[in-house]
Image (cartoon, coloured by chain):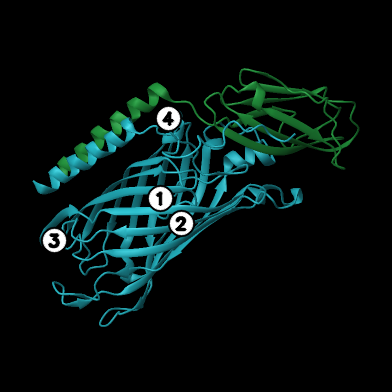
Amino acid sequence: MRNPMRTLLVVTSLVLALGASAARAHAFLDRASPLVGSTVASAPHEVILTFTQNLEAAFSTVEVTDGNGARVDQGKASVSGNTMRIGLKAAGPGSYKVNWHALSVDTHTTQGAFTFRIGNP
Amino acid sequence: MPALRASQTFALGLLFAVLSYSEAFAHCFVGARFFPATLAIDDPCVADELSLPTISWEKTADMPPASEWDASAEISKRITEDLGISIGDTWSQINHPGGPKMAGFADLETTLQYQLLKDSDHEFAELLGLIVDWGGTGASNSGIGTAYTLLTPTYYFGKGFGDLPDQAGWLRAFAVTGEIGYQIPSRSFDVVQQAAVPQAVPWGASIQYSMPYLKSEIQDLQLPDFINHLILITEAQMTTPAANNFGNSWVTTGTINPGVIYIGGTYQIGLEAQVPVNRESGHGIGVLGQLHFYLDDMFPQTVGQPLLGPKTAAAQKPNF
């Protein structure tokens, strides 16, 4: 068993070394404000999404809709580094959905959606 | 020595593949759902990935049971956006108590796969594959390889439950995957073993609970970061004899594998127990572990692109 295992170990180490030097990855949503699935007492002024990778501004977007599907965001997201933010119009109590698409700087696309509520926690 | 030369050749081949190909992208994302590479069965996507190594230990169904170690490697590469190929091999060592020790390579396995469907809204993926275990390429003298080839057309699927209503809450983080095939040997009778070579139905499934999905799509419970990288999983891997099984048992054999997969940025690590479903499947609980690399993340401009055709759907502006 020794020789094949040693070969595997050597190849694995080389791949690890190669990968570590070049690695970037898909942009996962790391945290959001308001928090994913949370209930906040008052309407936030903006939604902030922080990702695990830097984003390409031209191809990364977010929209926020109310329970009737009407947009309540201010239309243009701003992207800086790994953070995307979008302003909100005045919003009342209810459930809101955040839909986002992200393109990381190494051209990997990801997407997702979550809800938050405005009301009594 | 022949086994050693084969392993070195395979290792060099893997390195050559990693270093030389140019173009490709994407492991198994379907909408917001990420299906990890499963350890016992295959995930429902073509991809640019490398499993290196997958190592397992188990006690065989023999009486008395033998101790078996397997170490394998597999590389998957997309040819076009929807067409991919995998090449892999397994080195096995079987120790019979008080008896002979057998070791060698199993037959070389290749898989051609075509992505039938990726439905982002419903987190649903379908894949067709043709697995070929090439007879005569393994250690057939020790019974680890075979002298005949096996052809196994296989259907794979994956379904995430993120499209359930919001009221389903944490249940939306569940997903299932599965596969079913029909294994056809190139010979109906093994002259060496003096036994019929059965046709069989290999099938399997997994149920997964994604902590990353829970955190980013349903509710951020602000759990420790390590927990938020875990996918809890139970896999089942079975084989049911179907035809030409004269003189053999008709019992379905296989294992059920509870375990966990840690999702890193460019890799994943999986660890599962292997629980035999009956006496014909083995004795006691085995172990299965795997280190798996996402080549599209490690080498996004080279290995992580398809060999042919457009460079993936990366630069498509969303429609809102």
Please give the label number shown on residue B142.
Answer: 3
Residue on which the image places disc 1? B39
For marks 3 and 1, the one nearer the N-term is 1
> Vertically, is B166 above or below B20?
below
Q: Is residue A7 left or right of residue A23?
A: left
Q: Chain of mark 1?
A: B
- CA separation in Å, label 1 and label 2: 8 Å
Chain letter, green: A
Please check whether the numbered discs 1 and 2 fall on a single chain.
Answer: yes
Q: Could you tell me which secondary element the residue under label 4 belongs to?
A: helix
Please check whether the numbered discs 3 and 1 fall on a single chain.
Answer: yes
Q: Chain of mark 3?
A: B
Kindly check if marks 4 and 2 are in contact, taking CB atoms under 8 A apart as contact.
Answer: no
- CA separation in Å, label 3 and label 2: 30 Å
In the rendered structure, which amino acid carries the disc numbered 4?
A: Met
In the rendered structure, which amino acid carries the disc numbered 1?
A: Leu
The outermost residue toward the bottom is B246
Q: Nearer the viewer, residue B273 or A20?
A: A20
Residue B11 x, y percent position in the rendering: 23, 39
Residue on which the image places disc 2? B235
